[in-house]
Amino acid sequence: MDLFEAIRTRRSIRRFTYRPVEEEKLQALLEAMRHAPSWANLQCWKFIVVKDSAVRERISELTYVESFFSPLGYKTNPAKKGVAEAPVVIVACADPSRSGNIWGQQYYLADVGIAAQSLMLAARALGLGTVFVGVFDEEALRGLLGIPSPIRVVGIFPVGYPMEEKTGGSPRKAMEEIVSYEKWQ
Ligand SMILES: Cc1cc2nc3c(=O)[nH]c(=O)nc-3n(C[C@H](O)[C@H](O)[C@H](O)COP(=O)(O)O)c2cc1C
């Protein structure tokens, strides 16, 4: 699939079939993440691949947090079910001390965000689906997966074959609303 087609047609996938993800495809996704750029090329990330269904189920439960506020009006995390049913879940972590922190810019978030986009586009190109799950109980997740406390969990990515093909893009702001030329306006 052409890169621009993958960019244009990628959608957040939150429901998955039971079809397993082939090992070559999983490795291709991880390679795509590994090749992402990062601050000073420090690659502050670590990606935990979870296949164990009991652990996926527990992670799914941790995507709900009491203080969850959704601008879209969801009462719980809409990706909760998908995290349990996807055959593979990738938990993307970062060590903030291994990335830049200059004038309050926390580059580890950008580092992992870019790797996440590589994952999402690669998944799309391979016929797989995923979604960036950014709401979760980080402390509990640390306990579950043995992640030491200086390490931050940035995102959870359920990966699998989509239950349905989403046609049409999700709404986007108009170009003139998000782009200005030469100065802020
Ligand atoms: C940083 C970040 C965090 C997100 N967290 C969640 C989440 O916790 N649960 C969820 O269902 N979707 C989550 N999403 C997915 C967005 O809701 C989704 O990308 C957006 O609605 C646009 O839809 P699309 O990806 O299909 O284009 C997150 C996306 C980003 C970039």
Image: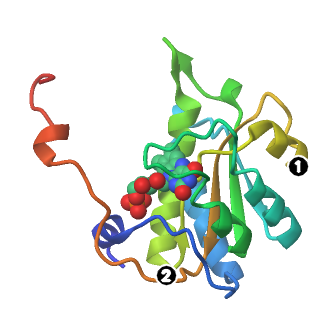
Which is nearer the N-term, disc 2 or disc 1? 2
The numbered mark at residue 27 is none
Image location of residue 82, percent across then percent down: 64, 69
Q: How is the image coloured?
A: rainbow
- The location of residue 120, given as percent across then percent down, is 49, 62
Q: Is residue 94 left or right of residue 174?
A: right
Q: Residue at x 75, y 39 (%)?
A: 138
Task: Please say if 80 is above or below 13.
Answer: above
Give the quarter of the image for residue 60: bottom right
Q: Residue at x 79, y 27 (%)?
A: 150
User: Which residue is more in the foreground, 40 or 138?
Assistant: 138
The extreme bottom residue here reads 19
Q: Hey, what amino acid is under mark 1?
A: Leu
Q: Nearer the viewer, residue 184 or 35?
A: 184
| Residue that carries the numbered disc 1 in the rendered image | 144
> Where does label 2 land, which residue?
127
Quadrant containing the N terminus is: bottom left
| Residue at x-position 59% and y-position 53% | 133
Q: Which of these two is toward me, 64 or 154?
A: 64
> Which quarter of the picture shows residue 137?
top right
Residue type at tag 2:
Gly
